[in-house]
Image (cartoon, grey):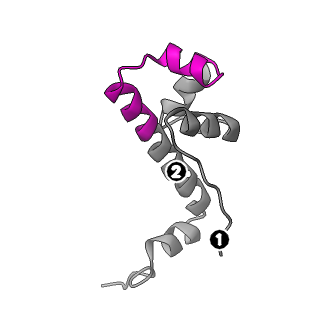
Amino acid sequence: MEKSKHLGSSFDSFLESEGILEEVEAVAIKRVLAAEVSQYLDLNQVKKTVFARRINTSRSQLDRLLDSENPSVTLQTMVKAARGIGKKLELKLAS
C-alpha cells in the first residue's frame, strides 16, 4: 500500500499544495457573511429590496452577496452588509 504524501499534514497545507488555499478561504469567509445576512433578514422579516436600499446598494449586489457560489462581490458591499446587520467586518493580515 502506498503511503499518502499528506498523512499527518494540516488541511491548510494540503489546500496550499493543491494551490487552492486562498480561494477556499475567501469562499468560506463570504459564506459566513452570506449566512449571517440571510439569517438576519429571515429573523427580522426584512425583504431583500428594503435591506438593499437601507445599505445603499442594489438588489442584484445583495443577491450576489447572498449567493454562496458567486465570488464576485466587492469589499465595499461586504462592509455595508455587515453594518446593515449591526456588525463590523474586520479584515486583518496575519502571518
Asked whether disc 1 touches disc 2, contact meaning CB atoms under 8 Å apart, the reply is: no
The residue tagged 1 is 94
- Indicate whether 3 appears above or below 27: below
- The front one of 22 and 74 is 74
The residue tagged 2 is 29
Name the residue type under label 1: Ala
**Left of 36 or right of it: where is 18?**
right
- The front one of 80 and 23 is 80
Of the image marks 1 and 2, the number of the one nearer the N terminus: 2
- Indicate whether 94 appears above or below 79: below
Using the rendered view, name the quadrant where residue 2 is placed: bottom left
User: Residue, x 47% and y 38% (percent of image)?
Assistant: 34
Q: Is residue 29 visible in the rendered structure shown here?
A: yes
- Indicate whether 38 appears above or below 3: above
**Could you tell me what secondary structure mostly forms the magenta stretch?**
helix
User: Residue, x 52% and y 43% (percent of image)?
Assistant: 87
Using the rendered view, name the quadrant where residue 40 is placed: top left
- Give the quarter of the figure containing the N terminus: bottom left
Residue 63 location (% of width, % of height): 53, 24
Report if residue 39 lies within the magenta region: yes
Residue 60 location (% of width, % of height): 59, 19
Q: Is residue 72 visible in the rendered structure shown here?
A: no
**Left of 79 or right of it: where is 12?**
left
Which segment did they paint magenta?
Answer: 35-59
User: Residue, x 62% and y 34% (percent of image)?
Assistant: 80
Residue 35 location (% of width, % of height): 41, 39
- Give the quarter of the figure containing the C terminus: bottom right
User: Residue, x 65% and y 71% (percent of image)?
Assistant: 94
Using the rendered view, name the quadrant where residue 54 is placed: top right
Mark 2 falls on what kind of element?
A: helix
Q: Callout 1: few (<14), some (14-19), or many (20+) C-alpha neighbours within 10 Å?
A: few
Name the residue type under label 2: Ile
